Amino acid sequence: MSQKLKEVMEMRPNHVKHNLQGGKVSVGTWLSIPSPFSAERCGRLGFEWLVIDMEHNPISIDMAAMMIMAINQTPTAPMVRIPWNHPEHIKRVLDAGAWGIVVPMVCSKEEAEQAVEAAKYHPQGFRSNGGGRYELSFDADRAAYTSRANDEIFVAVQIEHIDAVERAEEILSVPGVDACFIGPNDLMTSMGMLGKMDVQAPQVREAFEHVVQVSNKVGVAPGIHARSGADVTRRIKEGFRFIAMASEMGLMIAGLNREKALIEL
C-alpha cells in the first residue's frame, strides 16, 4: 500500500474535539450569510471552527454542503447549527461533511440522547450508513470514516432555556455530548427578560456560572456566544472554552456602521 493511500485511510482528526478534550480553549464564529465565498474567506482567518447557522438563516442543505466544501479547503473545521433537534437534520449535515453539530434548545436528558444517537453509527446510535461526501470532508475513504466517525464527530447541545439550566447535569452527563453552548438571548427570554436583555443581571450571571460549574464537573466543555473579541476574552476568564465570536454578518454590519459614522459630508 502506498504512503499516500495510508494517509488517506488514517483520516483527519477533529482538532476542535481533541483540543477541547485536552482542556484547551477553542474559538470560532457563526456564519449567517448563505455563501461559500464568504465561508472560504472566514476559513482563512485562523478560527478553529466555523458554525454554519441553519437555524436562524435562509441556508438550505445544498448551500450548507457548498459552504462545508469551501471551508474544507482551509484548516478550519466546518460545523453546522441544525434548524432543530431532529434526526433528519443531523443525518443530512453530517452526510454533507460537517465535522460537528450544534443542537438548539436541548432541555432534557432524552433530547440530548436523541441528538447523540442521531449523530452516531451503531452501536452508539442509529445514524444511517448511506452515501454522501462525508469521507471527503475528512480526507478519508468510506471505510476509514465509518470506523472512526463516532470518535471524531463533535456534538454540542445548546443550553438556552432556564429549564435546561436547571437540568444541566442530567443533560450534560449524556455520553457523547462534547460541549454545551449557552444561547444568551433565548435563555434570557425564557427567564422573562424579553425587551430588557441584560447579560450582567445577577440571575443571568448565576445561570452562566451554574452551567460552567456543571460542565466542568461532568467533563464537558462549556460554551457561549460572545459579542466581540473583548467579550471572548472575558468569557475565557469566566471559564468558558467553546466560544463563538459574534457572526460574520454582525461584524460586517458593525464595521460598516463604524466607518459610516466617520464620513464627513
Image (spheres, grey):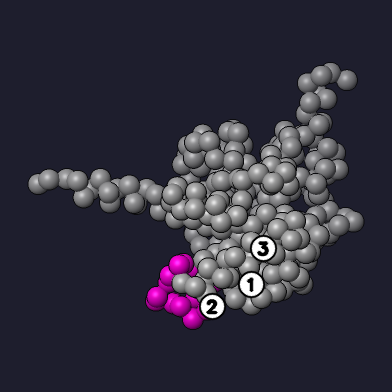
Q: Could you tell me which residue is drawn at 27 percent across and 49 percent down?
A: 258
Q: Horizontal and vertical percent for residue 25?
A: 61, 45
Amino acid on which the number 3 mark rests in the picture? Gln
The one of 26 and 255 positioned closer to us in this rendering: 26
Task: Identify whether 18 is placed above or below 112.
Answer: above
Task: Identify whether 2 is placed above or below 52.
Answer: above
Q: Could you tell me which residue is drawn at 49 percent across and 81 percent down?
A: 192
Disc on the earlier residue, 3 or 1: 1
Q: Nearer the viewer, mark 3 or mark 2?
A: 3
Magenta part of the protein: which range? 185-200
Q: CA distance from mark 3 to mark 1?
A: 11 Å
Task: Identify whether 4 is placed above or below 240.
Answer: above
Horizontal side, residue 113 vs residue 208: left or right? right
Disc on the earlier residue, 3 or 2: 2
Q: CA distance from mark 1 to mark 2?
A: 11 Å
Secondary structure under tag 1 reads helix
Residue 3 can be seen, yes or no: yes
Please check the rendered image and state whether residue 193 is part of the magenta-colored stretch, yes or no. Answer: yes
Disc on the earlier residue, 1 or 2: 1
Residue hosting label 3: 213
Horizontal side, residue 20 vs residue 191: left or right? right
Looking at the rendering, in which quadrant would you find the N terminus?
top right
Residue hosting label 1: 165
Q: Horizontal and vertical percent for residue 238?
A: 56, 56
Residue hosting label 2: 190
Q: Are marks 1 and 2 in contact (CB under 8 Å)?
A: no
Amino acid on which the number 2 mark rests in the picture? Ser
The one of 255 and 8 positioned closer to us in this rendering: 255
State the mark number for residue 74.
none
Q: Could you tell me which residue is drawn at 37 percent across and 48 percent down?
A: 252
Q: Could you tell me which residue is drawn at 55 percent across and 64 percent down?
A: 183
